[in-house]
Image (cartoon, rainbow, N blue to C red):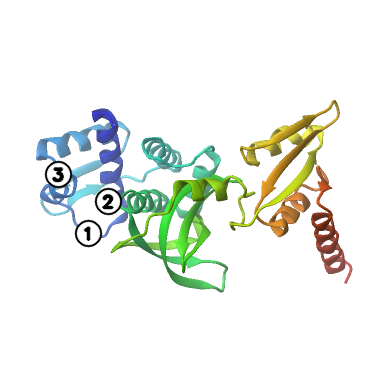
Amino acid sequence: MSDFRIKLKRQIEILNLVLNSSKRYLYTDLEDIFDCERITIKRDLQELRKFGIGIYFSKKKGIFIDNKITPQLLSDFINQYISLSSIYSDSQKATKSLVRSLTNKSLDIIIQIQKCINEKKTLRIIYRKSKTEIKERTVEPAVLFVGDNEWRLVAREDFHLKQFFLYKITKIEILNKRAKPIDKKEIDNILNSSLFSWLDTKHYEVVLEFLPDYGSRALPFIVDDQQFIDNSKSRIVKIKVNSLEEAARYVLSRCGDVIVHEPQELKNLILEYSKIIFNSYNK
């Protein structure tokens, strides 16, 4: 990593520490954390102020921020940090969505998870699966990525790779415990066969037809190893997915703009789900 990229990454991490921690940070603390001289930290604060962040030092408060950081500026810093890290990302919409949900905490979530991945450590999270189900979970993070305009984390929990929405993480703690390495090919294989709402190791081949008005918007969310059969009216794609239930929900959510050609099992699932939806509105 170049000196400029190291400097920018450090400045964003300094901003996050001061923004999201109740601890009073002194120059000596940051010198120890980032293994650099005080003059370097002072320059970092000076450069952060050029971005419009009122970050200063006083003997009483330590390093502090005296102004509110706008959602747009938070999004800019997150996107910059993402570009400096090895993160699977293809959308800035996900960052804006995360900032709306978590405000200042969004920067902390991204940085802490990525640091945990880089340092190969285990992570403890408080995860809000639903309004009524909030649970503490210990996971081994593998990779951050964007799917369907939401930031997600692939992590191992209880020997299984699972997917977590970042906006549902309410608290995070890096544990002093090494995470077992996860093979990159295994991660890529799972991501490349997921429509981004479920992860599993099984694979099913499906053939979907995207109608003209919808195809150009839908296809970016499909996996990389696509095989296309183009015609003048629509676009047909053969892909592998790792959950037929997920594929059925994906097709139904597209409101008739995606047609299933194969397999029959997927068609049957869609009919079954459609009947459930129809009956729920027909009571």
Q: Earlier in the sequence, mark 1 or mark 3?
A: 1
**Front-most of residues 72 and 210:** 210
User: Which residue type does callout 3 highlight?
Assistant: Asp
Picture quarter with the N terminus: top left
Cα separation between marks 1 and 3: 19 Å
Position of residue 188 measured from the top left corner of the image (x, y, whole percent): 52, 45
- The reply to whether dot 1 and dot 3 touch (C-beta < 8 Å) is no
User: Which residue type does callout 2 highlight?
Assistant: Leu
Cα separation between marks 2 and 3: 15 Å
- Tell me which residue sits at (74%, 32%) in the image: 228
Q: Which residue is mark 3?
A: 35
User: Which residue type does callout 1 highlight?
Assistant: Lys
Q: Which residue is mark 1?
A: 23
- The reply to whether dot 1 and dot 2 touch (C-beta < 8 Å) is yes
Position of residue 57 measured from the top left corner of the image (x, y, whole percent): 16, 45
Position of residue 246 measured from the top left corner of the image (x, y, whole percent): 69, 56
Circle 2 crowding by C-alpha within 10 Å: few under 14, some 14–19, many from 20: many
Q: Earlier in the sequence, mark 1 or mark 2?
A: 2
- Tell me which residue sits at (39%, 35%) in the image: 80
